[in-house]
Amino acid sequence: MNILLIAELQDGQIRPGSLSALTFARQVALETDGSVRWLLLGENLEAATTEAARYAPVLFCDAAIFAATAADSWAAAIAEVVSTGNFDLVVAASGTFAKDVITRSAGLLGGAMASDVLGHAFVDGRLQLQRGMYAGSILATVTLLGSPQIVTIQPSAYAAAEPGETPATVTNEQIDTSRLPQNIRIEHLESKRGGRPDVTEAAVVVSGGRAIKSSEDFESLVGGLADTLHAAAGSSRVLVDAGIAPNELQVGQTGKIVAPEVYLALGISGAVQHMAGMKNSKVIVAVNNDPDAPIFEVADYGMVGDVYEVVPQLIERLG
Ligand SMILES: Cc1cc2nc3c(=O)[nH]c(=O)nc-3n(C[C@H](O)[C@H](O)[C@H](O)COP(=O)(O)OP(=O)(O)OC[C@H]3O[C@@H](n4cnc5c(N)ncnc54)[C@H](O)[C@@H]3O)c2cc1C
């Protein structure tokens, strides 16, 4: 397959999730005797294109219109590159960027899309994809019949790709940016995230629920244990709605879908909408003072206790 991998950049660098998506793309290219190329959109891309070329050939368009990720212009640009380059598979890391941009590209392209893919296999030469459906209640195996195929990859499902031995080619893609839609203008971007990894990209996620009473407690207990384990901090929706945890940390049906090696749920009951975002985690550890909390039904390891007593001890023992 002729594969176009859409790079997601943060502070001018390729996000780890895009490198996981590259691992998927490389495996599909190997199976199908195909090839993978990056597409980088942005402004002042020199360092990013150099970095990307360590992994795979690069197409890029460096233009002021791409300085912020306005979904309408980005989606149209991606669709144009896919069409002119005759790509038959478009790959990106799943997450907020993909929900906003890649889905719009898929709409413009037609074809068929599978999001939040957790695994894949080739059966009789056909690519089959595994993804959660119905709020994570089932793991579905799907085959995409349309063309192009558009796939977003759950970053934690694939290891980050390693660079190649020699740098690949870098090609300036000619896009007539004056013809792109410009109905969305980004006024301001705000992130409350500290130096911790994103919940979708971390191998270990520590999440807090209603048991946590304040932002300060969230930072010392959830953030403190996350830092001890070099993990991401996550949250149930209750804490986000209460303003205790920032929106971008929310795990669940209306938050982010995660599948880390280890997921620690601190004072989270295990509502179906929360489990939709984390039940594919490889190992689930729960701390809850209610022995009948539903989270214990999916937990591999459970501890009945008060998070205010247990978590400081964990931080001390593991630190
Ligand atoms: C359409 C829709 C979408 C939704 N999307 C999401 C979503 O994306 N993500 C999400 O998380 N929720 C979502 N929800 C909300 C969801 O239904 C639950 O309300 C929410 O997940 C509950 O969060 P919680 O487990 O933190 O709180 P609770 O359900 O109140 O559970 C708190 C738990 O903490 C335990 N506890 C209390 N004090 C302590 C203590 N000191 N030590 C240890 N344990 C303690 C309690 O025993 C309890 O089990 C959605 C709801 C709807 C209707």
Image (cartoon, rainbow, N blue to C red):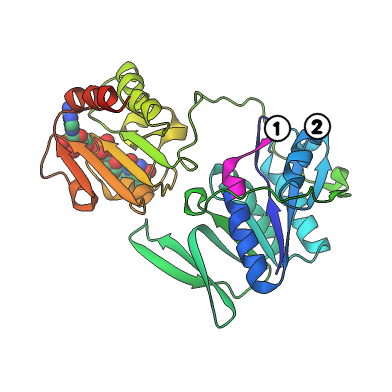
Q: Position of residue 167 (x, y in %)?
A: 79, 47
How many other residues sit within 10 Å of disc 1, few (<14), some (14-19) or many (≥20)?
some
Using the image, determine if residue 113 lies above or below residue 204. Answer: below
Residue that protrudes farthest toward the left in the picture: 291
Q: From this view, report whether residue 48 is shown above or below residue 295.
A: above
Q: What residue type is labelled 1?
A: Gly
Q: In this view, does 236 lie above or below 219?
A: below
Number of the label disc, if any, that sits on residue 149: none
Dot placed on the residue nearer the N-terminal end, 2 or 1? 1
Residue placed at 67% from the left, 31% from the top? 186
Residue 305 rendering spot, x and y as whole percentages = 13, 32
Q: Is disc 2 surrounded by few (<14), some (14 to 19) or many (20+) residues within 10 Å?
A: some
13 or 115, which is in the foreground? 13
Q: Which residue is drawn at 54% across and 55% down?
A: 153
Give 170 or 89, whichever is nearer the viewer: 170
Name the residue type under label 2.
Asn
Specify start and end residues of the magenta stretch as a single range: 13-19
The quadrant of the picture occupied by the C terminus is top left
Residue 1: image quadrant is bottom right
In space, the residues marked 2 and 1 are separated at their CA atoms by 8 Å
In the image, ligand 1 is in what quadrant? top left
View extreme (top): residue: 216
Look at 33% across and 37% down and name the residue there: 236
Residue matched to label 1: 12
Could you tell me if residue 309 is visible in this image? yes
Residues tagged 2 and 1 counted as in contact (Cβ below 8 A): yes
Q: Residue at x 59, y 53 (%)?
A: 21
Residue topped by disc 2: 44
- Please say whether residue 94 is one of the residues in the magenta stretch: no
x, y percent for residue 68: 71, 33
